Image (cartoon, helix red, strand yellow):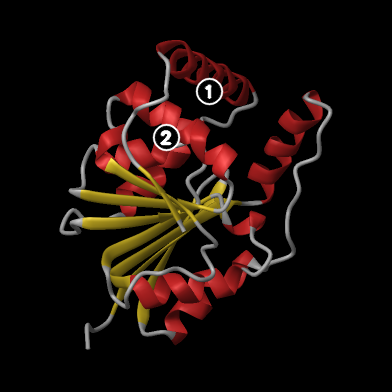
Amino acid sequence: MNMKTGTNGFSNEEITAAHNHFMERDALYKKYGLERAETRRVVFRQLSADNDSILEVGTGKGQLTAMLAGFFNRVVSVDIDSSEQRIAMLNTAYSGLYDKIEFITSDAGKLAFPDRSFDAVVSSFTFHHLEFPFKVIREMVRIAINQIVISDFNRRGFETVEKIHKLDGKTHVQMPGDFSIVGVYLKEFNFDVKIIENEFQTTYTAMRRSNF
């Protein structure tokens, strides 16, 4: 597990370039009807304000990470891809919140955190990238004290993402995990689960029924 802290090594040019690229991609997605900022807000709004510490599984490009760091006292973000995570570091540096976040490069299916060590665990648009998604969710269950929030694209969301990838001559790879049973899975581990559906995403927000 490699821990990375501090802003040393980031030039202003790198930070600005990463931000500009991200904003260009946001604008492109918006042309296709998908406002990525709103998908992040949907996830953020599910988190209880009573939480103090947040573990994010799947750093992505760091925009949700920055939102979390702007509100909660402790934010740790885990991702298996160090090169992608560095982009998130640059984006959170642009927001001025990088030093509030602990970035960890690790397999989310086997995390070195004690049981019940974060008030909430959140994961956005990561499930479809996971080879063994329910192994990761089992870790989320183990680590969360109060709450788990998991969000991913629905069919229309994936169709839109695929259109964007085709513009780049790429294919958006989806692993075969069944996102539709996430809520059932969490209920089996003593969580009350609410499902939020919108045009492009499905979000499961789960509160633990008891803390014993």
Q: Earlier along the polypeptide chain: callout 1 or callout 2?
A: 1
Q: Residue at x 27, y 81 (%)?
A: 209
Taking the image as shown, residue 46 lies to the left or right of residue 9, namely left
Residue 4: horizontal and vertical position, in percent? 39, 43
Amino acid at pointer 2: Gln
- Residue 97, located in which quarter of the rendered image? top left
Q: Secondary structure at mark 2?
A: helix
> For this rendering, which residue is in front, 124 or 65?
65
Instruction: Provide residue 77's location: percent of width, then percent of height.
Output: 40, 50
Residue 186 relative to residue 157: left or right: left
At 51% across and 40% down in the image, what residue appears? 85
Instruction: Give me the residue at 33% from left, 40% from top.
Output: 5
Query: In the orientation shown, which residue stands out farthest toward the right?
Result: 169
Q: Which residue is mark 1?
A: 22
Q: Position of residue 74 (x, y in %)?
A: 22, 51
Is residue 121 rendered to the left or right of residue 204? left
Q: What residue occupies the far top of the structure in this picture?
A: 13
Residue at the location (64% across, 60% down)?
130
- Compared with 14, 65 (above or below) is below
Q: Give the crowd class for mark 2: few <14, some 14-19, many >=20 residues within 10 Å.
A: some
Examine the rendered structure and indicate whether residue 53 appears above or below residue 180: above
Determine whether label 1 and label 2 are within 8 Å by CB.
yes
Identified by mark 1, the residue type is Phe
Q: Which residue is mark 2?
A: 63
Q: Nearer the viewer, residue 15 or 20?
A: 15
